[in-house]
Image (tube, rainbow, N blue to C red):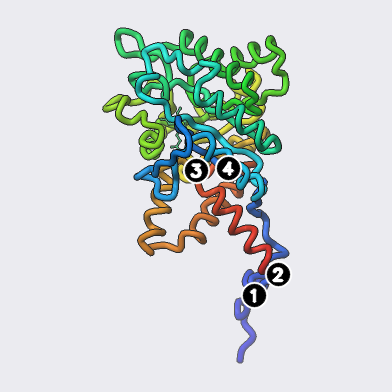
Amino acid sequence: MADFPGRFPLTRMRRMRCHDFSRRLMREHRLSTDDLIYPVFVLEGSNRREAVSSMPGVERKSIDLLVQEAEQVARLGIPLIALFPVTPAEAKSEQAEEAYNPNGLAQRAVRALKAAVPELGVMTDVALDPFTSHGQDGLMNAEGYIVNDETVEVLVKQALSHAEAGADIVAPSDMMDGRIRAMREALEQEGHIHTRIMAYSAKYASSFYGPFRDAVGSAGNLGKGNKYSYQMDPANSDEALWEIALDLQEGADMVMVKPGLPYLDIVRRVKDQFKAPTYVYQVSGEYAMLRAAGMNGWIDEQACVLEALLGMKRAGADGILSYFAKDVAQWLRDAALTR
Ligand code: PBG
């Protein structure tokens, strides 16, 4: 009866949430097919496919089958695929010479993809782990330390061989110091002025990479080894900004934070500070968790995947590498049709 202040909420936040039309009108972020990058694993041989046991739904494929998949990826409207070769054991060595073989698996796959589906962007991984007998991303000295400057020389050769094969983007994921500048200079020198560099700048020493190492077959080589002397400590965040600043100064066109979900604070800080094209990698372990829970019926997989990717966009990512990319593109398409 008595008129007292506080009887009604001053602002009803729920008013705008009340109907679909007003929820849509105030929606700040949207996931689009243009945001997606699809990572793929390529095998030797023809008409070959292998399941990756720790990543149900993901397969390693020979080049011919990969080309067919790439046509589908392009039709779905996904702008870019990221290529990861599965190197046969006999091609691995201490010095990782196979990394820059002009007729290596990655180089041949790039040529086949660009010939068959020229409109689809192709990005290659620049790092030595698929090619070293010890599974590390660089060359190892007698003490077991991964040597920086000697590794950079090999990485430059690898990046050039990818550019020569027609890669649109080279993506150094090795975390050696000074590699972006060395690669950029070599690419310019050789006339590859339009080859973009997506630097895995803030790449953490994460346990979420486990299933990927199974997929490319480097897990067995790496054994109990770790990558702590070059990948970043998950405890750090200022250090990520420093890494990003260096890579941009050295000539990176795009920068990446990896993994995704546990590192979205880093994505936000990077985007706020540098305003550069910023990407995030929803890595193999993140895929495996969502997939496993989805397959068991413990979560609604589609809803949880879309929510995780939207969170990455909200954190400031301009694009997302995701093993779910094809599913997401299809879901977005279906949703647009039923609207
Ligand atoms: C190798 C590389 C890794 C990933 C991408 N490039 C693994 C690692 O650093 O050990 C991980 C991707 C994923 O987990 O999905 N340089």
Tag 4 or tag 3, which sits nearer the N-term? Answer: 4
Residue type highlighted by circle 4: Gln
> In the rendered image, which residue does mark 2 sit on?
22
Observer-nearest residue: 114 or 55?
114
Observer-nearest residue: 262 or 272?
262
Q: Residues within 10 Å of mark 3 (few under 14, many from 20)?
A: many
Residue type highlighted by circle 1: Cys
Q: Is residue 231 left or right of residue 324?
A: left
Quadrant occupied by the N terminus: bottom right
| Residue 166 picture location, percent across and down | 65, 24
Tag 4 or tag 1, which sits nearer the N-term? Answer: 1
Tag 3 or tag 1, which sits nearer the N-term? Answer: 1
Q: Nearer the viewer, mark 1 or mark 4?
A: 4
> Which residue shows up at 35% across the image and 13% down it?
145
Residue type highlighted by circle 2: Ser
Tag 1 and tag 4, C-beta contact below 8 Å: no
**Gap between marks 1 and 4 measured at Cα:** 45 Å
> In the rendered image, which residue does mark 1 sit on?
18
Q: Is mark 4 within 8 Å of ligand 1?
A: no
**Gap between marks 4 and 2 measured at Cα:** 42 Å
Tag 3 or tag 2, which sits nearer the N-term? Answer: 2
Quadrant occupied by the C terminus: bottom right
Tag 2 and tag 1, C-beta contact below 8 Å: yes
Q: Residues within 10 Å of mark 2 (few under 14, many from 20)?
A: few
Disc number at residue 68? 4
Determine which quarter of the picture holds residue 102: top right
Q: Is mark 3 within 8 Å of ligand 1?
A: yes
**Gap between marks 3 and 4 measured at Cα:** 24 Å
**Gap between marks 1 and 3 measured at Cα:** 33 Å
| Residue 104 picture location, percent across and down | 50, 21
Q: Residues within 10 Å of mark 1 (few under 14, many from 20)?
A: few
Tag 3 and tag 4, C-beta contact below 8 Å: no
